[in-house]
Image (cartoon, rainbow, N blue to C red):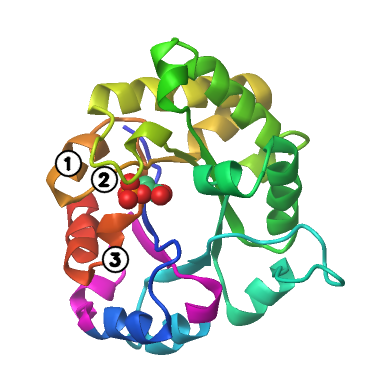
Amino acid sequence: MSTRSILIAGNWKMNMGPNDTADFFEQLDAESQKQIDGVIAAVCPPFVSLATAFDSRKSASAVKIGAQNVHFEDNGAFTGEISTSMLTEVGCDYVILGHSERREYFGEDDAIINKKVKKALLAGITPIVCVGEVLDERKQNRHFDVVKTQTAGSLEGLSASELEKVVIAYEPVWAIGTGETASPEQAQEMHAFIRDELAKLFGKEAADTVLILYGGSMKPANAGELLQKPDVDGGLIGGASLKPADFAKLVAIAA
Ligand code: PEP
């Protein structure tokens, strides 16, 4: 029986400006924002909504707040970018790194993601590092190789104790925003594979502490069976995390 916590993290993507963010916390009842033993709830709004998220949480809310990206330099001439110190200044606990949309549309590769992971760790922010294959790679039976390369590349140079502060999200790209979910068995198979790879690279003790989330059309209707799998330690959730009622249900299912 694993002693790992469950993390339910919402990735709001380019949705939810400050007004919608305030409404979300207004509608998310206080009960759902309470600390539940063994469960961590988090949402990752766009940068401009972070301050509103902190201000709008109910008092004593246990919902953590994260960002969806960060730059790997400290400051300077990087127009449009945000640094880790800016994220810590507003109070972010998490940052999503290497999401497939960042890889596909913004040219992020494992080397860039690796620099960001290291920078986040230095700042005390927990990186949620996304890995996952596209449909063709799965059809060609290359999904394990792809995920192995992404995992090793994104985490290169970390110590075992640093790894323990990282969260991995396995997000098969064919399941993101498509309504198609990996089966619980497919998710478990890949999560166990990732944990084995982490054990080879960083040792079993560290690998056993790492939270590995599943992401890809997770919603209240399918979360229960996914979260029952021994190596599925939570979810990174896009669409279903935008609705307070669904987010609350997901947190309740994880409890
Ligand atoms: C995501 O983008 O991280 C994600 C899992 O999205 P969705 O839940 O909408 O598939």
Cα separation between marks 3 and 2: 12 Å
Label 3 with label 2: CB-CB less than 8 Å: no
Q: Which SS class for mark 1?
A: helix
Tell me the quarter of the picture where residue 243 sits: bottom left
Q: Is residue 56 above or below residue 146?
A: below
Q: Is residue 212 left or right of residue 124?
A: left
**Mark before the other along the chain sequence, 3 or 2:** 2
Where residue 149 appears, x then y in whole percent? 63, 23
Count neighbours of disc 1 (C-alpha within 10 A) and say few if under 14, some if 14 to 19, many if 20 or more.
Answer: some
Q: How many marks?
A: 3
- The residue that appears at 19% across and 62% down in the rendered structure is 246
Which image quadrant: the N terminus?
top left
Q: Which SS class for mark 3?
A: loop
Residue 218 has which mark? 2
Disc 2 marks a residue whose amino acid type is: Met
Q: Is residue 196 left or right of residue 202?
A: left
Where residue 134 appears, x then y in whole percent? 45, 28
- The response on whether ligand 1 sits within 8 Å of label 1 is no
Residue 242 has which mark? 3
- The residue that appears at 21% across and 49% down in the rendered structure is 219
Indicate yes or no whether the magenta region holds residue 158. Answer: no
Label 2 with label 1: CB-CB less than 8 Å: yes
- The response on whether ligand 1 sits within 8 Å of label 2 is yes
Tell me the quarter of the picture where residue 94 sits: bottom right
- Residue 159 in view, yes or no: no
Tell me which segment is drawn in magenta.
27-50
Disc 3 marks a residue whose amino acid type is: Leu
Cα separation between marks 3 and 1: 17 Å
Where residue 194 appears, x then y in whole percent? 50, 25
Residue 222 has which mark? 1
